Image (spheres, rainbow, N blue to C red):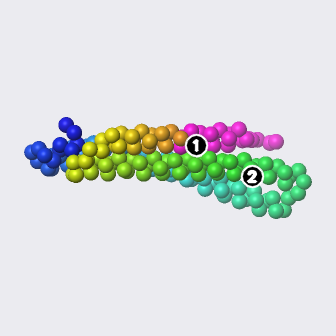
């Protein structure tokens, strides 16, 4: 049964219930994206705080120490940009999922044939989420590649 046919049948309550059932999976996806956004935002805050501390040290440093700090700041900048990109892509993905849910309801209430757009929006949302995760994985790789534990 197409979503547009939902309100031409028996009861509107069961039709609305069916649309809500269809929108449950995207809503759970929004919850997952929200959790990812929390992790990414916390990571970005830590990167920025650490970079600010390094900038303060750089003001009072010179020579080899200053060069080392500049190199670390360049890496921190790359990490911040990747994390910011990840956050942007996650938000884009979440917005597209929200549009999918809205279109599901418009299809049912207004009898608009937009199911093709729902599919394409969902695919675009997944591509944005994939891009976010790849950028986030790249940021994690960079952070662990320069990681030093113990005396150096």
Image x and y of residue 10, in percent: 9, 45
- In front of the other: 111 or 78: 111
Is residue 147 something one can see in this rendering?
yes
- In front of the other: 105 or 113: 113
Q: Farthest left residue?
A: 10
Residue at image location 71% in from the left, 38% down from the top: 145
Per the image, the residue denoted by label 1 is 136
Per the image, the residue denoted by label 2 is 73
Specify the segment rendered in magenta: 132-152
Q: Is residue 142 magenta?
A: yes
Q: Is residue 50 left or right of residue 90?
A: right
Is residue 35 something one can see in this rendering?
no
Residue at image location 68% in from the left, 48% down from the top: 78
Q: Residues within 10 Å of mark 2 (few under 14, many from 20)?
A: some
Residue at image location 35% in from the left, 47% down from the top: 100
Image x and y of residue 23, in percent: 30, 45
Mark sitting earlier along the chain (2/1): 2
- In front of the other: 30 or 150: 30
Res 85 label: none
Image x and y of residue 76, in percent: 70, 50
Real-space CA distance between mark 2 and mark 1, rounded to the nearest whole angstrom: 18 Å
Q: Is residue 77 left or right of residue 12?
A: right
Image x and y of residue 98, in percent: 37, 50
Q: Considering the image in quadrants, where does the C terminus appear?
A: top right
Q: Is residue 135 magenta?
A: yes
Image height check: is 141 above or below 74? above
Q: Secondary structure at mark 2?
A: helix
The image quarter in which residue 24 lies: top left
Q: Secondary structure at mark 1?
A: helix
Q: Are marks 2 and 1 in contact (CB under 8 Å)?
A: no
């Amino acid at each position: 049964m197409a979503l547009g046919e939902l309100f031409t049948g028996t009861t509107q309550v069961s039709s609305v219930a069916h649309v809500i059932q269809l929108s449950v999976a995207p809503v759970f996806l929004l919850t997952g994206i929200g959790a990812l956004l929390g992790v990414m935002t916390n990571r970005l805050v830590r990167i920025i705080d650490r970079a600010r501390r390094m900038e303060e040290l750089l003001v009072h440093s010179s020579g080899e120490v200053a060069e080392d700090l500049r190199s670390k700041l360049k890496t921190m900048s790359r990490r911040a940009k990747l994390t910011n990109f990840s956050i942007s892509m996650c938000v884009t993905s979440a917005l597209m999922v929200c549009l999918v849910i809205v279109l599901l309801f418009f299809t049912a209430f207004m009898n608009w044939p937009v199911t093709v757009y729902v599919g394409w929006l969902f695919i675009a949302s997944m591509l944005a989420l994939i891009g976010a995760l790849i950028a986030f994985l790249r940021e994690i790789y960079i952070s662990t590649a320069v990681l030093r534990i113990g005396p150096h």
